[in-house]
Image (spheres, rainbow, N blue to C red):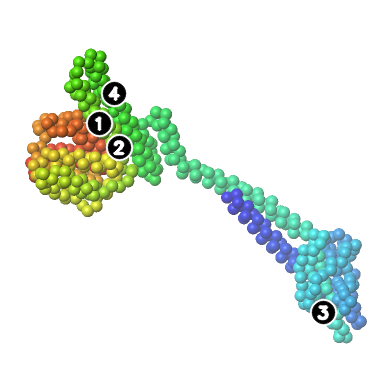
């Protein structure tokens, strides 16, 4: 705005200066016509000027208005008259002109000059060529321009201050929601707040929501890491104590040592699985759920080739959802692997879009059913706990369903289990946002 107003001031001053010079040129032209009307030619062709002119400034020395008349001869120009106001001033030599033309110049000594060439013929037919010159000090134009500059700069400064103030207030008002978010983020950093819970502009609500989701996920990750480390440390205390006792009084009790080492291996593997579960929010990227289901089913069909599985898919060609790809593989892979492991022959997998559950809108509903024996009564909640398996005779660490349950919870989804009405075995329903 400063540059804009400076350019406006320069443009207006230049325009006014040109206008004032044009006005002065017209006045000098009128003065030339006044001298022409006052001049007369005698019978010999000589130019005669009256002792007094209509413009009194021509008669006052130093008045600022000066007049000259030069006769153009073959030998050159000869001064034949100057106004009393021009006494002591040098003759202003005009440039080459043709009869009937004039030229307006800014001459030496800070004066504006108008030269006018005319050919005059008397009654006897004698022709003479004269150049009428009128000059005026530039102080008149300078004073006008200076007065305009003072007025213009004052009012432009006032307008600039007003507009800058308005702009400052508008920007401050419009950026207030951002300052509120910054203050709330600082409060969260200092532990005074848990989330961005202020009233924000509509344009910033999406940003606030994503930041809240990011904060929640990071806190969940931190809490999970702390819990996992605490669980790992606590779980290893007993096996380490047993191993320490074995080393102090070692009587070839290799079975006990192997048992404790195997237990520690399971504990470490379980905790590492939990720590590796990212559970990131949908702010990451879109993943094709249909493609992941097809890849997993194709791989498991080869693993359980002896069962001759009949896996039925009812999924859309493309099903893009916001999720970390590794987490989606973990969820679908564990559920489908369990279905293939426990089924007799048939597994059904279906995907529905835009489902509603408990007054919440979910983008995807994944159903996985099998014709196996299902989960024994009273063990459904237990298998979601760490280290618990539906059948202790089946190999595994009992962590798959726990990881699935935690991942779905971190993603903001919902996991439900029950009996399949179609196949009679287990049915898992996964709601994902």
| Contact check, label 4 and label 1, Cβ < 8 Å | no
**Which residue is label 2 attached to?**
278
Q: Nearer the viewer, mark 4 or mark 1?
A: 1
Judged left or right of residue 83, residue 381 is left
Quarter holding residue 37: bottom right
Q: Which residue is depicted at the point 23% across and 35% down?
A: 403
Q: Give how far across and how far down residue 296 sits, in percent.
A: 20, 45
Q: Measure how far apart labels 2 and 3 are at the Cα level.
A: 102 Å
- Point 87% across, 84% down: residue: 126
Q: Residues within 10 Å of mark 2 (few under 14, many from 20)?
A: some
What is the distance, in whole Å, between disc 3 and disc 4 at their CAs?
Answer: 119 Å
Dot 3: element = strand
Position of residue 410 in the picture relative to residue 51 (left or right): left
Please tell me which residue is depicted at 89% across the width and 71% down the height of the picture. Answer: 79
Q: Are marks 2 and 3 in contact (CB under 8 Å)?
A: no
Q: Is residue 318 left or right of residue 8?
A: left
Q: Which mark is residue 233?
A: 4
Name the mark on residue 203: none
Horizontal and vertical percent for residue 422?
8, 45
Residue 419 visible (yes or no): no
């Amino acid at each position: 705005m400063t540059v804009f107003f400076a350019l406006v001031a320069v443009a207006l001053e230049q325009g006014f200066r040109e206008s004032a010079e044009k006005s002065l040129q017209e006045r000098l032209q009128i003065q030339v016509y006044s001298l022409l009307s006052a001049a007369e030619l005698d019978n010999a062709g000589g130019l005669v000027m009256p002792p007094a002119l209509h413009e009194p400034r021509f008669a006052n020395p130093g008045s600022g208005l000066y007049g000259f008349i030069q006769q153009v001869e073959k030998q050159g120009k000869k001064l034949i008259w100057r106004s009393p106001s021009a006494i002591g001033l040098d003759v202003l030599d005009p440039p080459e002109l043709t009869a009937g033309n004039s030229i307006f110049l800014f001459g030496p000594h800070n004066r504006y000059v108008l030269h006018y060439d005319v050919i005059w013929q008397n009654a006897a037919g004698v022709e003479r060529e004269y150049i009428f010159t009128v000059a005026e000090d530039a102080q008149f134009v300078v004073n006008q321009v200076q007065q305009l500059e003072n007025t213009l700069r004052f009012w432009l400064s006032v307008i600039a201050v007003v507009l800058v103030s308005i702009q400052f207030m508008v920007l401050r008002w419009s950026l207030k929601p951002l300052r509120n978010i910054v203050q709330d983020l600082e409060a969260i950093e200092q532990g005074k707040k848990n989330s961005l819970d202020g009233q924000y502009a509509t344009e910033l609500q999406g940003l606030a929501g994503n930041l809240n989701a990011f904060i929640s996920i990071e806190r969940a990750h931190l809490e999970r890491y702390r819990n996992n480390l605490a669980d790992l440390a606590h779980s290893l205390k007993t096996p380490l104590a047993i191993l320490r006792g074995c080393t102090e009084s070692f009587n070839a009790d290799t079975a006990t040592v192997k048992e404790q080492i195997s237990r520690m291996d399971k504990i470490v593997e379980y905790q590492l699985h939990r720590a590796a579960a990212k559970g990131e929010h949908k702010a990451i990227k879109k993943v094709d759920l249909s493609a992941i289901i097809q890849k997993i089913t194709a791989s498991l069909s080869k693993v359980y080739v002896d069962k001759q599985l009949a896996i039925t898919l009812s999924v859309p060609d493309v099903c893009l959802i916001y999720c970390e790809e590794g987490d989606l593989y973990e969820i679908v892979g564990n559920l489908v692997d369990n279905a293939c492991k426990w089924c007799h022959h048939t597994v059904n997998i279906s995907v529905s879009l835009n489902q509603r559950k408990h007054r919440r809108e979910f983008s995807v509903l994944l159903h996985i059913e099998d014709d196996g024996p299902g989960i024994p009564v009273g063990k459904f909640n237990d298998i979601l706990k760490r280290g618990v398996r539906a059948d202790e005779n089946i190999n595994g660490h009992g962590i798959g369903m726990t990881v699935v349950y935690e991942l779905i919870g971190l993603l903001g989804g919902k996991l439900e289990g029950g009996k399949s009405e179609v196949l009679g075995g287990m049915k898992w329903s996964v709601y994902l946002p």
